[in-house]
Image (cartoon, helix red, strand yellow):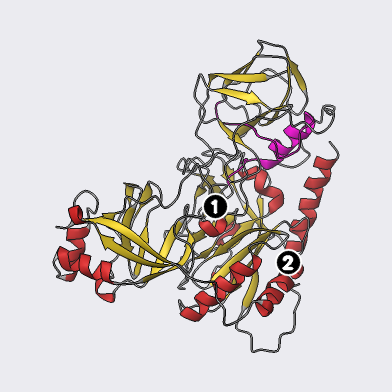
Amino acid sequence: MLNRIRVIEAGAQTTVQDLGRFGWAHFGVSASGAADPLALRAGNLLVGNAENAAALEMTLVGGAFEFENDALIALSGSDFGAGLPLWTPLEVKAGGVVRCGATRSGARCYLSVRGGLAVPRVMGSASTHLATGVGGRVLRAGDVLPVGDTEVRQPRRAAGPPPFSRSAPLRVTRGPQAEWFGDELYRGSWTVSEESNRMGLRLRGEPIASPAGHMLTEGVPLGAVQVPPGGQPIILFVEHQTTGGYPKPANVISADFWRLGQLRPRDQTAFESVTIEQALALLRAVEEWLYSL
Amino acid sequence: MMASVSTQTLDPIQIRAASDRSLLVGFGEEISPEAHRAVRRLTAALEHARGISNLHPAFASVLVEFDPRLHTHAQIERLVRESLERAPEDEPPASRLVEIPVRYGGTDGPDLDDVARHHDLTPRRVIELHSSAEYVVSFVGFATCFPYLAGLPAELATPRLASPRRHVAAGSVAIAGAQAGVYPLASPGGWRLIGRTPLRLFDPAGEPPPLLRMGDRVRFVPLAEGEC
């Protein structure tokens, strides 16, 4: 039966996200997609969707959502005070409301619904790129989102939270200009600035010595740690620019991308250097947990 | 850890890991026609290659992103080298000439007078110089289909603004250092704005390709009502 979700309260910054828009970086369009892809994928798998289905991403303060018909949903990521268990499939009755509030842990919470959100795809993806308006905009009270019928398997049992640390140092591999830098990045702790957004996480701490080198603008990937002349690092995030001219001592590993999406303004973080082989072993552990759902 | 694949030529290509899911392929440290051709060749060769999730061409490098669950850095390095060997050296993709109509000065180009003063030229002369040159799109990048244009007359090279504007209108025609460009969408920006085009470079609700693509030749054509 056709189902729809009505936005009663939008929250601080609620958007539709899937895993992103790939294949357009040579036109300057970055992937966007879920800030915490682990939570999005897990939520979708729990309700029986393909892991790339479109779902709601809430940031810092969640919204309230009314379901026109019976639905099967999952909440994943951080606890936004909905009074419902996370990481588990939940039944919502017709007319039921899921009401989230301010976060009690990290920056993002996802609401996945069985069948996925049936919103138009732009360049092959339903994800919202806030900075450019590609794929839509931030949701507002009164918006109505149709639920699709793209479920691919039976719903799963409760999973429990992923068995990975949220507070350990962020693991990074060496960036293209790593030899220009000393080890200052790895010494102190860094505070996430209020100016952070989906384009970049700006860090504040003891400034890193500006490397004496000239570089041409080059392509930059998700998770790149770039250091402008002021010495305060910026981690390029899901809506990052596709090219940039600041040197990059390090790059956050794929297995820790999800943790970037859970960092809040004023959170403390630190960096730990790993090899690419270690990064791939850590990624395998994340994938194995997902495939165990 | 990188696979070393033998090539007969004296190979000026630098390949290194940029992250656990990307390789940065460099063709030297200079902006040059040779580097631009190599960037275009590799981008064209890999555009539809299986296993590549994103390509980021720039002045003298291409960042190649892939899914590390499916491919190793060594496999992608081999694919890059084989693609470069296969792509014919002397047949770059055909380049188009695109004309961009521009209203110069006034609210469309708030920095035109400053640029003129900076070089001790009249605004009319700045317009003449800017619109008489032929540019080449070095690459499209930064934030959403921004074309980086080479070919700005040396007399017009102007430093960026000391502090970027919070809002630059879509279609703004701009210069920064020795580069020229056009803002496809409204955004913050630190380039000097000398005019604005009514053309739509990119439609956020549509599909790329954007109006200007890597390798295109570009001319700016003054619109009568924008003349000073």
Q: Residues within 10 Å of mark 2 (few under 14, many from 20)?
A: many
Q: Is residue A30 magenta?
A: no
Q: Is residue A204 above or below residue A68?
A: below
- CA gap between label 1 and label 2 equals 21 Å
Q: Is residue A55 magenta?
A: yes
Mark 2 highlights which residue? Answer: B73
Report the residue at 77% width, 31% height from top.
A151
The answer to which of B117 and B84 lies nearer the viewer is B84
Quadrant (top left/top right/bottom left/bottom right) for the N terminus of chain B: bottom right
Dividing the picture into quadrants, the one containing residue A36 is top right
Dividing the picture into quadrants, the one containing residue A148 is top right
Image location of residue A139, percent across then percent down: 52, 28
Three-letter code for the amino acid on which mark 1 is drawn: Leu
The answer to which of A12 and B224 lies nearer the viewer is B224
State which region is magenta.
A32-61
| Chain at numbered mark 1 | A
Image location of residue A153, percent across then percent down: 83, 32
Mark 1 highlights which residue? Answer: A236
Q: Is residue A144 above or below residue A24?
A: above
Give the secondary structure at mark 2.
helix
Image location of residue B4, percent across then percent down: 75, 79
Three-letter code for the amino acid on which mark 2 is drawn: His
Q: Is residue B117 visible?
A: no
The answer to which of A287 and A233 lies nearer the viewer is A287
Report the residue at 24% width, 50% height from top.
B108
Q: Is residue A8 above or below residue B139?
A: above
